[in-house]
Image: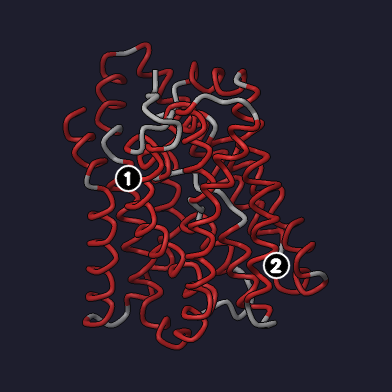
Amino acid sequence: MSRIRETLEQRQVIIYFCSIVLAAVIATLVPGTGALEAVINPALALMLFVTFLQVPLADLRRALTRVRFLGALLVTNFMVVPLLVGVLVQLLPQDPMIRLGLLMVLLTPCIDYVVTFAHLGRADAKLLLAATPALLVAQMILLPLYLRSFLGDEAASLVHLGPFFDAFVWLIAVPLVTAAAVQLWAARSPAGSRSAAMLGVLPVPATALVLFIVVAAMFPQLGMATDAALRVAPVYIAFAVAAPLLGWAVARAFGLDAPAGRAVAFSAGTRNSLVILPLALAVPAAVPVLPAIIITQTIVELVSSLIYIRMIPKLGGNQNVQ
């Protein structure tokens, strides 16, 4: 199982791109793929469950006791990155829907495939993985506040709190509690241990499944939002360049070692587009602009991750994860 998992992680970017292309082709040839929107949330719940399952309870306690790392991670994602986004959003037209889409995706740090990207980039991936529940809870609490700060009263008319509560229950609480229950079962039963090992190969396939469902469901309508996607793409590229460097600078200011600093850099540059999409779809008249803006960020991010995997290991010289 460990060999299969390692192979999947090594080839995950190619797998994700293939999922996107396959979904686009099928959506073009087969009518009615928009109905897949109904299964986006269950697929996301599965993806987050198998992600949380990789967080041993001991590592979760370890992350909470690594105060400097957690502090650097939170300061980067919820103070420094919002300042960067505040600058970048000024490059966009005043269209509130375009700005809303960009803000929703850039203000929410990734909590799924960033872990395997960080591992491939010689970062402390276990420490980052253990911090994912804290990142997810923090972004769900803070995102409505950030949107109101950036958009003013416009945010109140576009964004409702109900979907955020639903996301907290179904995308955080339920997957996290279920993952903890499976871990306890694995610790007490050989059958549980075997089941946990089998589930351990699913993070990459589950993420690929979510990408496939999202693109297949949204693709038939994305053509109407091509202009919006082209407007945000340069901003996403600028973010992809600046954010990891800012994350690394914060990590060094906090005195972190190189592997932990690289983890902060990966977290700064990688966003939570897949998890944020259901919240975006709850916005009135969201389709096609918001899905197009969010999917564009995912594509830019996957290309950027190929570069991160090669460049971020150079940060901090040859110091490796212990």
Q: Is residue 50 visible?
A: no
Amino acid beneath label 1 = Arg
Q: Is residue 240 left or right of residue 193?
A: right
Q: Examine the image and state in which quarter residue 69 appears.
A: top right
Q: Is residue 101 visible?
A: yes
Circle 1 — which element?
A: helix
- Could you say where residue 321 lies in the image, as x and y percent from the top left? 39, 23
In space, the residues marked 1 and 2 are separated at their CA atoms by 38 Å
Please name the residue shown 35% across and 52% down the image: 307
Q: Secondary structure at mark 2?
A: loop
Q: Give the residue displayed 63% in from the left and 71% down from the top.
A: 283
Q: Which residue is mark 2?
A: 159
Q: Which mark is residue 310?
A: 1
Quadrant that contains the N terminus:
top left
**Rendered position, 18 above or below 166:** below
Residue 153 occupies quadrant = bottom right
Task: Tell how many labels.
Answer: 2
- Taking the spot 52% from the left edge, 82% from the top edge, the residue there is 228
